[in-house]
Amino acid sequence: MKYLFFVLGYFAVIAGGNAQNALIIPPSISGTSFQLNVQNGTKVFYTGTSTPTYGINGPILAPTLIVNKGDSITLAVHNGLTVPTTMHWHGLHVAAYNDGGPGQIIGINATWSPSFVLRNNAGTYWYHPHGAGQTDPQVSKGLAGMIIIHDSAEMQLNLPRTYGVDDIPLIVQTKAFDVLQQIAISTEMDTAIFVNGTLHPTFQAPAQVIRFRLLNGSSMRSYNFGFSNNQSFYQIATDGGLKDTPVLLNRLRLSPGERAEILVDFQGMNGQNVDLISYASEMMNGIYGAAMVGMQEDTIDGYSQNFLNGADFTILNINIIPINASPVTSIPSSLTPYTPYNKDSSTVTRYIVFDTLRKLPLDRPNLADGPFGINNKSFSMDTINISTTINSQEVWVLVNKTLVAHPFHIHDVQFNVIEQSGSSPSTSQVGWKDVVLVLPQDSVKFVTRFETFANATVPYMYHCHLLHHEDDGMMGQFIVVDNTNTSIQPISNNTFDIFPNPANQQLKVIAGESVGSGTISLIDVSGRTVLTKNIANNSYPIQIDVASITNGLYYLVNSDPQQKHAAKVIIQH
Ligand code: C2O
Ligand code: CU
């Protein structure tokens, strides 16, 4: 029965035909105050049927917000749906209570009005709902929009920036339709390819340098972009803004959530037709969209039924027309200076491990299809998984034990990838990033800094940006606390609270009441006491100098014989 459903779904897409439609350019709005009305809509994608959709200020997708770094903006997000929603500013560095995570629900008919200063560099960001378990259904039905930030460094460069003319948003998404041509989720048959909500899109590009802002807004699928005439192009920006110099490429892979800006030189090509293609046949197995994901019993049901998987397919037809009045005709030789975080000044290393989780004791989780967790936990609104400290610079090591590649995304910050598969990152990954694809049974290291917005109660998210995985619980919450202000430290009653852990120079300890007021000691794995500290009359947090302690695993224990407590500490210099 399931199979029949898929086959019919497949024919429905073919029946839609290949007639080309002019690429829709989402309307843009700029200024400092934005009214965003989340609403129900309908669209006729397939002749004779109207499909229910969601949109913002229109039936599908959302206006592009064009804003300037440094501006203070207010967004009034009104929920006109018949279900609750949320709105997250993906990539923006905002306080946790403005971030629009799963806790910031906008009720039916309610308006949420976050207001913040734009601190991000010029670049391409986006916004989409983020409700617990609701991201995929709401994004797939149409809720997603682009945010373009300009700043003075970017404005000084000779780059195309006339929106819709030579500066073109490309929100690339695949969707699945059921037999009634309703947008379907939780099927592998996402065979309909959309750009900016347009099926079979064609775009008229003047014969000059064109800037495409590529956003992979798909639920699951990665793309391997290239042009049908194999012409090269220049990547000028990663997720979080401009690179230092344009990088010449002929393929660029983007996983869900990732963005890139590219410059394509169409000079002298008036009258020609070029296709933007996803060369998925060249994508490594294990990446969702490649020919294969998983092996033996660890595969995804229905994956091989989808003819897009592992195939090269057209995303956008480009029809080159005469040059316009004010063309950009050259590629800048340099962009903006890039000063990444120095990994040597990081004080914390965290391991973020992707693995399968059992939902029931007897379930055998599937290494390709999940359910997946992070550090052995599924998302829970009530759990703060990680507590970071303000101004701490940290290395995060993402370890993927599964057979599918996961695009990892963290809120609040931008990071610099320092290692991918044990070597330096590829040039397309060098720069400011907020999503990075971690290949099957591989790892990625990045360095980042939690610079602003301490708040011990409202969390930020980190998660897999494959929306089925995110909605299924592959997400965690972190808070950024200010440990110079001890009054906001979460003190757990009967145990130690230790940070950072792993510790490098200073280990800070908050001891619950029952730990007593004697001494605490650090004991190594063979039971030898390596350090003892008197905690009577100590100010919180207790600081222990561990700079001269050898790397390794230790236990922190208290001296009270009645109420022994121990906590694991890793020392890592
Ligand atoms: Cu694009 Cu947490 O999301
Ligand atoms: Cu995932």
Image (spheres, rainbow, N blue to C red):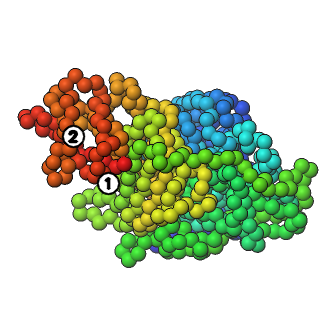
Q: Which x, y percent locates residue 108?
A: 50, 35
Q: Which x, y percent locates residue 235?
A: 69, 58
Image: 149 above or below 52: above
Q: Which x, y percent locates residue 242?
A: 67, 49
Q: Secondary structure at mark 1?
A: loop
Residue, x 58% and y 62% (percent of image)? 426
Q: Pick the quarter of the image with the N terminus.
A: bottom left
Toward the viewer: 387 or 49? 387
Image: 5 above or below 118: below
Q: Which residue is mark 1?
A: 376
Q: Which x, y percent locates residue 385?
A: 35, 43
Q: Is residue 452 visible?
A: yes
Toward the viewer: 472 or 276? 276
Q: Which residue is mark 2?
A: 531
Q: Secondary structure at mark 2?
A: strand
Earlier residue among tags 1 and 2: 1
> How far is mark 1 from mark 2, CA to CA?
32 Å
Residue, x 57% and y 44% (percent of image)? 91
Toward the viewer: 501 or 197? 501
